[in-house]
Image (cartoon, helix red, strand yellow):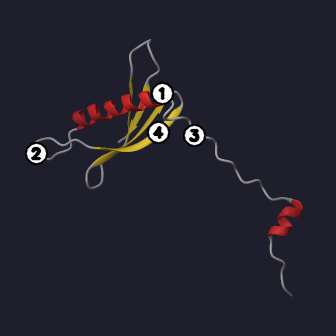
Amino acid sequence: MTDTATTGAANAEPTVETTVGEPSGTPLSVEVTFVYKDVPFTRSVPACLDASGAYDETATAARIALHANTMRYRVDNGLLTKPEPQPTPEAETGEDAAAAEPEAKT
């Protein structure tokens, strides 16, 4: 299950968009992707359990909201920034391609 939610006051500041994955692993956690001001950040958030040890979706959502507020603070204060685009290798063409290929032995 993927859930998308936003946190933030209406008409005040940009919101933090969150996409939450299914709980998994030991210890139980959910992978959450946060996006705020075009800055993406993905992390594993420990899941909350109820008294019987079952996954507590409501308590986990509250924990995720706390992480979203922390992410907002980090972006607003320059601690998290949009990742730099990764350079793509230039396609080898012409002489460069020929030089990169070993010569066939006859």
Query: Real-space Cα distance between discs 3 and 1?
Result: 16 Å
**SS of the residue under disc 3:** loop
Residue depicted at 14% across the width and 47% down the height: 53
Disc nearest the viewer among 4 and 2:
4
Q: In this image, 65 relative to 54: left or right?
A: right
Residue at the spot of label 3: 83
Q: In this image, 95 relative to 40: left or right?
A: right
Q: Residue 52, which numbered label?
A: 2
Q: In this image, 105 relative to 76: left or right?
A: right
Residue depicted at 16% across the width and 45% down the height: 54
Q: Residue furthest top?
A: 11
The amino acid beneath tag 4 is Phe
Q: Write down the quadrant of residue 64 in the picture.
A: top left
Labelled pair 4, 1 in contact (Cβ < 8 Å): no
Q: Which quadrant does the N terminus fall into?
A: top left
Q: Is residue 30 visible?
A: yes
Query: Real-space Cα distance between discs 1 and 2?
Result: 40 Å
Labelled pair 4, 2 in contact (Cβ < 8 Å): no
Residue at the spot of label 1: 77
Number of residues whose C-alpha sits closer than 10 Å to that of mark 1, classed few (under 14), some (14–19) or many (20 or more): few
Q: Earlier in the sequence, mark 4 or mark 2?
A: 4
**SS of the residue under disc 4:** strand
Measured as percent of width and height from the top left, residue 16 is found at 43, 27
Q: Residue 41, which numbered label?
A: 4
The amino acid beneath tag 2 is Ser
Instruction: From this view, report whether residue 51 is shown above or below residue 14.
Output: below
Labelled pair 2, 3 in contact (Cβ < 8 Å): no
Query: Real-space Cα distance between discs 4 and 2?
Result: 32 Å
Measured as percent of width and height from the top left, residue 48 is found at 22, 41
